[in-house]
Amino acid sequence: MKTGRNIPPFVYKLMLLAATIIWGFAFVVMKDSVDVLAPAQLIGVRFTLTALLMAAVFHKHLEGAFNKECLKAGFVLALVTFLAFWVQTVGLTDTSAGKNAFLTATYCVIVPFMMWALGQNRPTAANLGAAVLCVVGIGCVSLSAETLSVGFGDAMTLLCAFFFAAQIIAISRYSKRHDVLALTVYQFLFGGLMGLALGFATEPAPALSAVTSPDFLLNLAYLVVFASALCYVLQNVGLAHVPPAQGSLLLCLESVFGVVASVLLQGELLTARMVFGFALIFCAVVLSELGPQIAAKLSRRRNPDAAAALDDEADTASA
């Protein structure tokens, strides 16, 4: 595998690991920030500032991407991305950062089934097994022992996972025809405008003293500079030099760091049932990501003629 400029392969893996740590702690930062600024307004401000920052850094990529098709693709990406982050942030108002992190990670299990619904390859046995583990894990984490019902925050977080799955599929399709960095700028810009429009039309205006406080401004800077702009660069560069199976496994750690941050910074109390549920969800995500690749390797050894078909399924599941 080419690393370019003699950079050791492990550096790219460290990039992905760094992104997961930053994203993991971003769940806690978002939890604190949404107490100051309402969900849509917070997403609007965060995305707009991120778009301006990335446009300044990657302006050369925008020069050849200012056309109808690229703008349209950017708008579609912005819509699913805004809905994903907005619903996730709404969920944070009624659940813990740790539960929000793990329930969001279920998008990895959803992707193969959503692609199947769109006419792609049907899910593999690994995908089906991951789905079962995921459902049981969600039940352990989210169901109330008294009423056997899912709370509002957990339900919204599960809904956001569907939007994140749609975002991944959309990025996979559009990135083949358009400049990825230009798409990312449009994605944040249009998503930010959606958030500002919806937020200021439907949500109460924030207190000026709250949004200008040092704590909130530091949280916003973390979300814009690190959790949005920097992490997307780390992820894109890292995935370009790390095998998909390894890259997916590293990115799965985001949910783990989300729980770690919630426990360390917000004193979240974890029951044995929640920990067991988190473990099942994490195993489901890993199985969904790595299962098709493992099956393809085993099939290649036993039956080289059938390997190509399984490789296609593996690529689809890790898209």
Image (cartoon, helix red, strand yellow):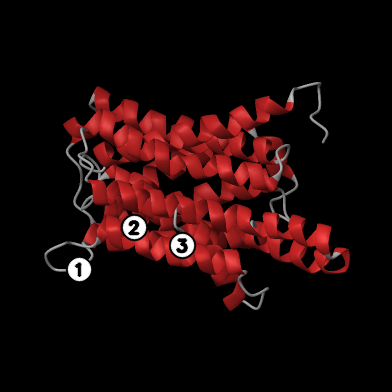
Q: Is there a contact, CB below 8 Å, between mark 2 and mark 1?
A: no
Q: Looking at the image, which residue is at 72% across and 48% down?
A: 179
Quadrant containing the C terminus in the rendered view? bottom right
Residue 200 placement, left or right of 57: left
Give the residue number, with chain letter if any, for mark 3.
163
Residue 281 appears in view: yes
Position of residue 3 in the picture relative to residue 123 (left or right): right
Please tell me in which quadrant of the rendered image residue 259 appears: top left
On the image, numbered disc 2 is attached to which residue? 157
Q: Residue 137 or 242: which is nearer the viewer?
A: 137
Contact? badges 3 and 1 (CB < 8 Å): no
Residue 174 showing in the rendered view: no
Residue where numbered disc 1 is placed = 149
Q: Nearer the viewer, residue 271 or 259?
A: 271
The amino acid pointed to by label 2 is Thr
Marks 2/1: CA–CA distance: 15 Å
- Measuring from the top left, give residue 136's x and y in whole percent: 36, 63
Query: Quick one: 281 or 34, which is closer to the camera?
Result: 281
Disc with the residue nearer the chain's start (2 vs 1): 1
